Amino acid sequence: MQQYFVPEENWQAESVTISGDDVHHINRVVRLKAEDEIICSHPAGHAARCIIASVESDAVHATVIEWLDNSVELPVDVTIAQGLPKGDKLDLIIQKGTELGAKAFIPVQAKRSVVKWDDKKRHKKKERFEKIAKEASEQSHRNLIPEIKTILSLSELIDESKQYDVKIFAYEEEAKTTNYQSFSTILQGMKEGQKLLVLIGPEGGISEDEAEQLKESEFSPVRLGPRILRTETAALYMLASVSYHFEELRWNECQQ
């Protein structure tokens, strides 16, 4: 069933109005009509099964059939702070990271980031990322759309990190040591409802100076297995690991 995220102002008690680009999607892409059913999601995280009452050129009106009480959000809030990569890799990270359950994304201008964004590019990129996150949330039937935060420097990220319960960064040098700290060790010490901040470096990784600065600010360096991962793979590895640990593994334990 097709899902659409609808702004709060478009909800009226037991009815909802869909506007904007989603109207074109309903009219021209999936070609829905009156009496077809859809899922409409409220910004507060609630979702409802609805039946379309009418389809117009600039709006789609629907009536709530029932409110759904299922949640597919991760038991812990995971924010991915991603060092700016080259090309369109961040598009992929946000799309797949949204499908895997990330709560928010923070682009980070790291020391080894090759690309630089001016103010105009930052605005355009943020708009693009928000669209990608919305579409990926609808495709994966998320309850919420991940927040795309403003690009930060490392020092700004450290200031921002004070609101998180657990802070880690993937560090290539950690993978080379024998006395390393694994990501699984971090997850085993976490509880449901906590907020996790994950920093991934750009293609060149995190520099030694940055690593020391992060450690001084209570970020823990972690190893992501024995292999060195590409920057666009690391965030997805972490999110999949969180899902397995908190959703699949614990669910299986409860069934035994």
Image (cartoon, rainbow, N blue to C red):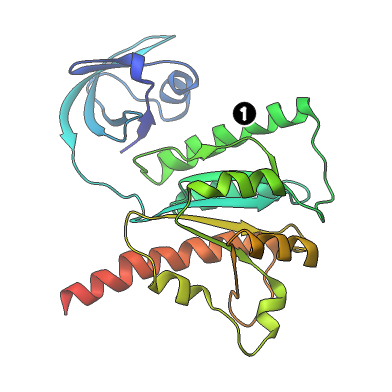
On the question of residue 91 being in view, the answer is no
Of the 4 image quadrants, the one containing the C terminus is: bottom left
- In this rendering, the count of numbered labels is 1
Residue labelled with disc 1: 127
Q: Is residue 108 above or below residue 42?
A: below
Residue drawn at (74%, 51%) of the image:
85
On the question of residue 3 being in view, the answer is yes
Residue drawn at (66%, 80%) of the image:
175
Q: Is residue 98 above or below residue 225?
A: above
Residue 206 located left or right of residue 136: right
Residue 18 located left or right of residue 127: left
Where's residue 6, x and y in %?
37, 24
Q: Nearer the viewer, residue 161 or 119?
A: 161
Q: Is residue 223 above or below residue 138?
A: below
Q: Nearer the viewer, residue 233 or 35?
A: 233
Q: Is residue 245 above or below residue 218?
A: below
Residue drawn at (79%, 36%) of the image:
117
Of the 4 image quadrants, the one containing the N terminus is: top left
Q: Quadrant of residue 130?
A: top right
Circle 1: residue type: Glu
Where's residue 134, x and y in %?
48, 35
Residue drawn at (48%, 42%) of the image:
136
Q: Residues within 10 Å of mark 1 (few under 14, many from 20)?
A: few
